[in-house]
Image (cartoon, grey):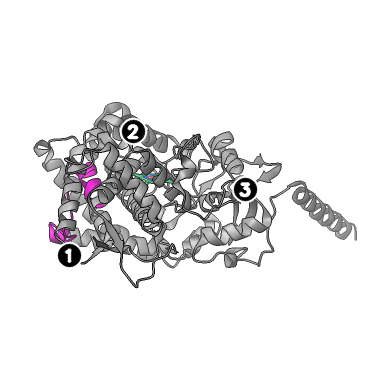
Amino acid sequence: ATIFAGVLVFLVLFVLTKRLSFTRQRLPPSPLSLPLIGHLHLLARMAHQSLQVLSNKYGPILYLKLGMVPTIVVSSPDMAREILKTHDAKFSSRPYFLVGEYFSYGYCGMGFTPGGEHWKNLRKLCATELFTINRIDSFEWVRKEEISRMISTIENTNGVINIRNLLITYGFNVMTETVMSKRFFCENGALLDADQAREFKKVSIETVEMALKFHISEFVPSYLRWIDWNIPKVKILQAKSDKFMQQIVQEHKRSKNSRKTKDFMDVMLESFTDSSNKQSFKAENTVKALTMELLAGGTDTSASSIEWALMELLLNPHTMVKAREELVKFVDLTNSTVNEGDLPKLTYLNAVIKETMRLHPPAPLLVPHKSTVECKIAGFDIPKGTTTIVNLYAIGRDPNVWENPTKFCPERFLGDSRIDVKGQNFELIPFGSGRRTCPGMILGLRNVQLVLANLIHRFEWALIPGREYGVEETTGTVNWAKTPLEVLKR
Ligand code: HEM
């Protein structure tokens, strides 16, 4: 009887202390959840849109359980500042992504790596070597050549023009030239070096499809990840992609002396043979992982922004008139193309780009962050290891922040407005802010400005009569318009 009483007292105390520790924790507001799946059923295909609806109901910080993973979603400039500035260091880790783990060669890259010395070294390499103004300027000739090619393709095409195809061809060629001095597409979008390029294209498409699938390993504790039925498929895909990357790196080493400009892969390979970095870099796997991330991170983000901008300009013709007037005023019409030196003069065009990124951020939920320690945000307790989502889409459309939020109105960024996209104004952070901010921001912006300016300076565009155009979205690598933009040249 004494033993029984002892066990009973122990159990009562155990339950009481558990309850107390739960009630002591003040979590952000949260909808009712279901066993096991938590709140996963509340997320539709457009997660940023369903989270916006939830935030409208529960407030600018809410708590969800995605499967078994604790998650917070923030949807106001003040909350975004708390996460990305005030408590930046505590929230700069990354949650688990299945494709991220395998395609980064077990965290040799940057985007999926939770943090640590290796990640810091890569960020440093980006800031001091790869994305300096000098390095970006040294590839101006690549962008100029690709712009000329794009223009001649348009000039030689009659009838309907698929803008998205042009943008992907431009963007991918610029990135592969900059990163590894190689072009994969010729003017009409056909593939050069056919076998290699076709294989790469196939693997890239399969990888994106795989990344977009539901992966149970991302919603269970780490000790249960092995149950994910997609792991074998991801491993096969990664092996195919590695074969291609290995070929590229070897080819690149062989052709070192034939290049007119030192490219990103040259810089990466040099950094890894420098003795001071030997310890921290996992050499070739790092080159391969980072190369893939730069290609993936640098192409569709810019292409989708340009496509959205052109779509909005065509749907709001008075803004197109203003943008073209500015180009006529500031760019010498005898020049066949708009040059990079012209870009800072184009105030209205830059306002168009800000307005486009407010309404259509390429990464509407950034890339999710994760907290590394327990911490308090807005009086709420945020447990260690919480996935943290910043909903840029909701912030960009919040009527408390923006007047007529769904209206495309570049003028809101003119006059006294000091709002920029560079990470200091938390109402508009398409590139993020703080430790995880996009390292390719300057290059990305340069491409968006340059291509958009050239497309509208050189050509007059028209929507196809009788066709319905709209601002519906679709999920993919980024937040694309649902239908690729097809237009006519006047
Ligand atoms: C990360 C946006 C262009 C490479 C990011 C993030 C965003 C973003 C929102 C996540 C920030 C966060 O986690 O808080 C954009 C946009 C672009 C663009 C809007 C163009 C319009 C580029 C380019 C490159 C690039 C041109 C490289 C060539 C990366 C990489 C990361 C990243 C490697 C991961 C950084 C890390 O996790 O430490 N980008 N990006 N991006 N971006 Fe970009």
Type of amino acid at the residue the image marks with label 3 = Asn
Q: Magenta region: which residues? A: 172-196
Q: Is residue 322 visible?
A: yes
Give the labeled residue for mark 3: 400
Give yes or no for contact between labels 3 and 2 (Cβ–Cβ under 8 Å).
no
Residue at 49% of width from left, 37% of height from top? 419
Type of amino acid at the residue the image marks with label 1 = Asn
Give the labeled residue for mark 1: 158
Give the labeled residue for mark 2: 125
Q: Is residue 418 above or below residue 360?
A: above
Question: How many marks do you count on the picture?
Answer: 3
Q: Quadrant of ligand 1?
A: top left
> How far is disc 3 from disc 1 in space, using C-alphas?
46 Å
**Foreground pick, 402 / 58:** 402
Quarter occupied by the N terminus: bottom right
Residue at 26% of width from left, 51% of height from top? 455
Indicate whether residue 182 is drawn in magenta: yes
Q: Marks 1 and 2: which is nearer the front? A: 1
Q: Marks 3 and 1: which is nearer the front? A: 1
**Foreground pick, 390 / 358:** 358
> How far is disc 3 from disc 2 in space, using C-alphas?
39 Å
The disc, 1 or 2, on the residue closer to the chain's N-terminal end is 2
Type of amino acid at the residue the image marks with label 2 = Leu
Residue at 46% of width from left, 39% of height from top? 414
The disc, 3 or 2, on the residue closer to the chain's N-terminal end is 2
Q: Position of residue 468 (x, y in %)?
A: 38, 70
Q: Position of residue 40 (x, y in %)?
A: 58, 64
Q: Is residue 3 left or right of residue 464?
A: right
